[in-house]
Image (cartoon, helix red, strand yellow):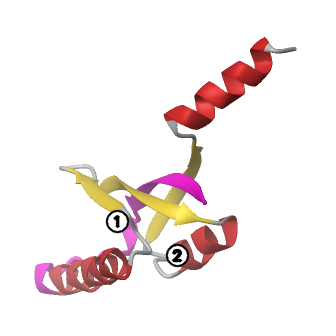
Amino acid sequence: MAKFLLLWESDITRAPVDPKQRIAGWTMLLNMVKEDLESGRLKDFGAFPGEHAGYCIIEGTEQDILRGTERYVPYVRFKTHTVLSLSQVLESMKALSQR
C-alpha cells in the first residue's frame, strides 16, 4: 500500500469574519479530521501553528487520496507527495547498483 504526505492549507478567504461562525466552521472541519483518524483513513495529522496549514499522512491508492481530499474542498487545498519507506529506497539503490 502506498503512503502519501499531504500538505494542506486552509483557504482563509472562505472563513467567516464573525469569530463564532469561524469557530463553528473550524470545529466542523476538525471533527471531519477526527473521524478520518478514528476510521483509519488518516494515519497522522498535524497543524503548523499560525500558518493555517499543516500535514497529514494517508496510506492507500491515488483514488483513496482523491476521495479523502474532496471531502474538504473548497475550504482546504492539498499538495500530495508519494512517500517511500527506508526499505523501498534501499531496494531501489540496490537495483541501481546491479546495473
Does dot 1 land on a helix, a strand or a loop?
helix
Residue shown at 54% from the left, 54% from the top: 3
Horizontal relation, residue 19 to residue 17: left or right: left
Q: Is residue 5 magenta?
A: yes
- Label 2 is placed on what type of residue? Gly
Residue shown at 53% from the left, 54% from the top: 4
- Label 1 is placed on what type of residue? Ile
Residue at label 2?
A: 68
Horizontal relation, residue 44 to residue 2: left or right: left
Query: Eyeballing the image, is 94 above or below 75?
Result: above
Residue shown at 42% from the left, 57% from the top: 57
Mark 1, Cα crowd under 10 Å, few <14 / some 14-19 / many 20+, is few
Extent of the magenta region: 1-20
Quadrant in which the C terminus appears: top right
Instruction: Identify the mark at residue 85; answer none if there is no mark.
Output: none
Horizontal relation, residue 23 to residue 59: left or right: left
| Residue 90 percent location from the top left of the image | 60, 26
Residue shown at 40% from the left, 69% from the top: 42
| Residue 37 percent location from the top left of the image | 32, 74
Q: Identify the image quadrant of residue 95.
A: top right
Mark 2, Cα crowd under 10 Å, few <14 / some 14-19 / many 20+, is some
Lower position in the chain sequence, tag 2 or tag 1: 1
Q: Are marks 2 and 1 in contact (CB under 8 Å)?
A: no
3D distance between C-alphas at marks 2 and 1: 20 Å
Query: Eyeballing the image, is 60 above or below 81?
Result: below
Q: Is residue 13 magenta?
A: yes
Instruction: Identify the mark at residue 12; answer none if there is no mark.
Output: 1
Q: Of tags 2 and 1, which is closer to the observer? A: 2
| Residue 5 percent location from the top left of the image | 48, 51
Does dot 2 land on a helix, a strand or a loop?
helix
Which of the two residues, 47 or 60, is positioned nearer the viewer here? 60
